[in-house]
């Protein structure tokens, strides 16, 4: 699996203000595994519980096993600090994580919940799956702080899950010891476990176990798409949100079969790790395993990712959606205007119309002439834009579109957005409305972005997006008072798209012919 197919550019951030110190009256919750004591936001409105174990440490004999139950504890457990993030290569030196460091013992989650809601009211739950190519990131990133969203009457849960070789590695020995004869998707099974945990425990925080929304960005959105398809997950949540990621249709790296995954990983195990069997693999120190298995982001070196394992995913995601066997839930999804700005054609000296035509020939062969109608460029500036659009389509945009098309055609509610507000300059070097740019707007954490001088339109759009997202979590549709109307996405509504900009408005998709051309070329 290539990292770029579902990557999340994890960018430089500043930490949020710390929560109030633990006090004698700190909130205490009884879980099925024991009691926890958290803290509160500075104004006392939001209770915060951090580093809650949702599975046993996946170490020793539990490395490359599905998540196992937590061992209950007797004393009240402190829940005022994030747990360690999962093992990952140190690719992005400016990644900020508010936790003690990395560890294999990383299967924890965090909860933000109102301290003042009425006991009889069950609050909707939003469970966040972070992105990062299934290779990077963690639930303690400052931009994922749940305080602002929780103020809108939802409970926010963020999770860690195993990454890279620890989360997506498969051998025939692993499959042989599995009752389901499956291996590889341990990171996906980790993500499934907090959904089960929430079903059992979220009522203790005031949440509604029957009204859970899963949401994620980039690889996290790829995961949301997969959970909608998985028979293990699709009955555990009521709504889904996907930001800049999908899984249906053409992908630069489709999910391999379990047999292919086993073949490739066993070759890697023998030639690179010099391990002859599963016992030797489990005996390797975690740091050694990480060092020997870590690629460079966007290096096109195969990395460890999801597969069609026959258990979590019994078939391809496209096949499951095409047969209408996915979770029958409302879906809110979309992407940003400049998804490929990290590899923009503008970086290529002298990039122009001829270069674009070569790209079209490489991607569409004998249909390159027809493709010119949909990626037209009269000058070099337009050629850069068209090339960036094509790269974005190959990266995440087309699979996101195909996801919404498939789900809508099955008769399920879909709401599509297009995030295009260009942010003010910051310490981030990317241009335009780049991949992951919307995250601080969604979470109401703009001030975690280093160096940005936010404008009134940024603050306003962030508030609007928080309302749309939380309204959707509450009711299955995003509209509410004092918000521009967001029509459903579908043929009878003229394929409406909500444009998230300084002025928010909905209008029909003016690029539908381009997508239909790609569908004809890529879904053969």
Image (cartoon, rainbow, N blue to C red):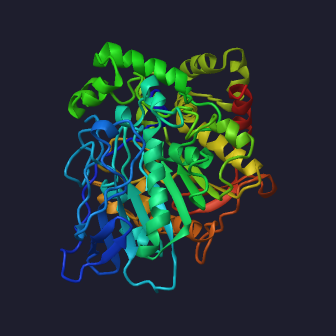
Against 403, residue 214 (above or below) is: below
Q: Position of 107 compared to 258: left or right?
A: left
* Image quadrant occupied by the C terminus: top right
Q: Is residue 181 left or right of residue 519?
A: left
Tell me the quarter of the picture where residue 450 sits: bottom left
Q: Is residue 417 visible?
A: no
In the image, residue 270 lies at what x, y percent? 34, 15
Name the one closer to the observer, 499 or 290. Answer: 290
* Relative to 506, 29 lies left or right: left
Residue 227, image x and y in percent?
A: 56, 48
Tell me if residue 481 can be seen: yes
Residue at 29% of width from left, 81% of height from top?
A: 43
Q: Is residue 328 above or below residue 161?
A: below
Residue 103 in percent (x, y) is at 24, 43
Q: How many marks?
A: 0
From this viewpoint, which residue is outermost toward the right? 492
Across and down, in percent, residue 352 comes to: 52, 23
């Amino acid at each position: 699996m290539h990292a770029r197919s579902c990557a999340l550019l994890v960018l430089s951030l500043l930490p949020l203000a710390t929560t109030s110190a633990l006090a004698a009256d700190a909130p205490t919750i009884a879980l099925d595994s024991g009691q926890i004591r958290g803290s509160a936001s500075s104004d006392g409105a939001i209770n915060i519980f951090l580093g809650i174990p949702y599975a046993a440490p996946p170490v020793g004999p539990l490395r490359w096993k599905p998540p196992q139950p937590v061992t209950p504890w007797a004393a009240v457990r402190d829940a005022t600090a994030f747990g360690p993030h999962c093992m990952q290569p140190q690719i992005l030196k400016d990644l900020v994580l508010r936790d003690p460091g990395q560890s294999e013992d990383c299967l924890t989650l965090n909860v933000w919940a109102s301290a003042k809601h009425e006991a009889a009211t069950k609050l909707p739950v939003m469970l966040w799956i972070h992105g990062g190519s299934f290779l990077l990131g963690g639930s303690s990133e400052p931009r994922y702080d749940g305080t602002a969203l929780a103020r809108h009457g939802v409970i926010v849960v963020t999770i860690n899950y195993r990454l890279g070789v620890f989360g997506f590695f498969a051998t025939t020995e692993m499959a042989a010891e599995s009752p389901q004869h499956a291996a590889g998707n341990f990171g996906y099974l980790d993500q499934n476990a907090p959904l089960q945990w929430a079903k059992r425990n979220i009522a203790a925080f005031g949440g509604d176990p029957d009204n859970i929304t899963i949401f994620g960005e980039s690889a996290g959105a790829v995961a949301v798409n997969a959970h909608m398809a998985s028979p293990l997950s699709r009955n555990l949540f009521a709504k889904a949100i996907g930001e800049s990621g999908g899984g249906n249709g053409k992908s630069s790296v489709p999910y391999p079969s379990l047999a292919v995954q086993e073949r490739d990983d066993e070759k890697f195990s023998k030639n690179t790790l010099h391990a002859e069997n599963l016992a030797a693999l489990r005996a390797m120190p975690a740091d050694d395993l990480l060092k020997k298995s870590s690629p460079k982001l966007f290096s096109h070196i195969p990395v460890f990712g999801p597969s069609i394992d026959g258990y979590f995913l019994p078939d391809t995601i496209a096949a499951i959606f095409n047969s209408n066997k996915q979770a029958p839930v409302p879906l809110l999804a979309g992407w940003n205007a400049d998804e490929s700005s990290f590899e923009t054609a503008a970086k290529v000296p002298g990039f122009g119309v001829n270069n674009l035509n070569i790209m079209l020939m490489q991607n569409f062969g004998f249909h390159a002439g027809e493709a010119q109608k949909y990626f037209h460029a009269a000058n070099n500036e337009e050629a850069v834009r068209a090339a960036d659009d094509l790269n974005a389509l190959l990266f995440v945009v087309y699979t996101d579109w195909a996801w919404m098309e498939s789900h809508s055609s099955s008769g399920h509610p879909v709401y599509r957005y297009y995030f295009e507000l260009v942010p003010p300059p910051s310490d981030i070097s990317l241009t335009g409305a780049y991949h992951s740019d919307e995250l601080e707007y969604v979470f109401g954490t703009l001030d975690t972005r280093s160096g940005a001088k936010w404008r009134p339109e940024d603050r306003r759009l962030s508030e609007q997006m928080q309302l749309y997202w939380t309204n959707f979590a509450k009711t299955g549709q995003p509209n509410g008072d004092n918000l521009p109307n967001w029509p459903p996405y579908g043929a009878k509504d003229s394929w409406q798209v909500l444009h998230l900009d300084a002025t928010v408005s909905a209008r029909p998709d003016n690029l539908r012919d381009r997508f239909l051309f790609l569908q004809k070329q890529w879904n053969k």
